[in-house]
Amino acid sequence: MPDTQWPRFMVFQQMAPGEPLVHNGTVHAPDIEMALLNGRDVFVRRPRAHAMWVTPVECIFAKTAQELADGTWLAGVQDAGGAEEKYHVFGKLHHLGQLDQLGMVEAASAPMAMKRAIEGFGGKPVLVWWVFPAARTLYSDEAEAESLFQFSESHDFKNQAFYPVITMMRQMRAKGKLED
């Protein structure tokens, strides 16, 4: 049976200008543009966001602290040369936290980007490392932030208290308009 799921995308959100982006979760979408909108609808209810990024899950190269503990993986990564590209670097700094944006590196491959990230940002204990190509990431446009994120703040459809369904059903039952 063929897989009927849409591709998964990781969603990252920045709460205010100057703050790092954090990983929020995943959404399914037919393409990256729709993933950005789905991410907004799922993750930007309250509080408001300043920026949002999405990237396909298959683009993320990840390693845990346990996988890196003995140093053999890092020692085996060699620079194969070739054209370098920019990679975003995220790290999970706390057991209960999300992955935070640590910075950016340039490399010709994801493993080399990971090695450079660990060398450049490894001064603090990181539980999980992620690198992914900047070229495969869709970024919300700062000029469109108001129109992209304001809508979710101003509409009550996201507020469960706005829909007193149980109360309305009890009232209908009491008036005999709804049978058990």
Image (cartoon, rainbow, N blue to C red):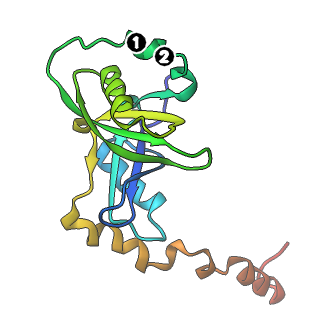
Q: Is residue 1 visible?
A: no
The amino acid type found where label 1 is placed reads Ala
- Residue furthest front in the image: 123
Percent from the top left, x then y, of residue 146? 27, 72
Total label count? 2
Question: Residue at horizontal 61%, vertical 79%?
Answer: 163
Give the structural element (helix, strand or loop) at label 1: helix
How far is mark 2 from mark 1, CA to CA?
Answer: 6 Å
Q: Quadrant of residue 104?
A: top left
Q: In this view, does 41 lie to the left or right of 52?
A: right
The amino acid type found where label 2 is placed reads Gly
Percent from the top left, x then y, of residue 140? 26, 56
Percent from the top left, x then y, of residue 178? 78, 78
- Circles 2 and 1: CB atoms closer than 8 Å: yes
As displayed, is residue 27 above or below residue 136?
below
Position of the N terminus, as image quadrant, is top right
Disc marking residue 75:
1
As displayed, is residue 44 above or below residue 86?
below
Question: Residue at horizontal 40%, vertical 41%?
Answer: 90
Give the structural element (helix, strand or loop) at label 2: loop
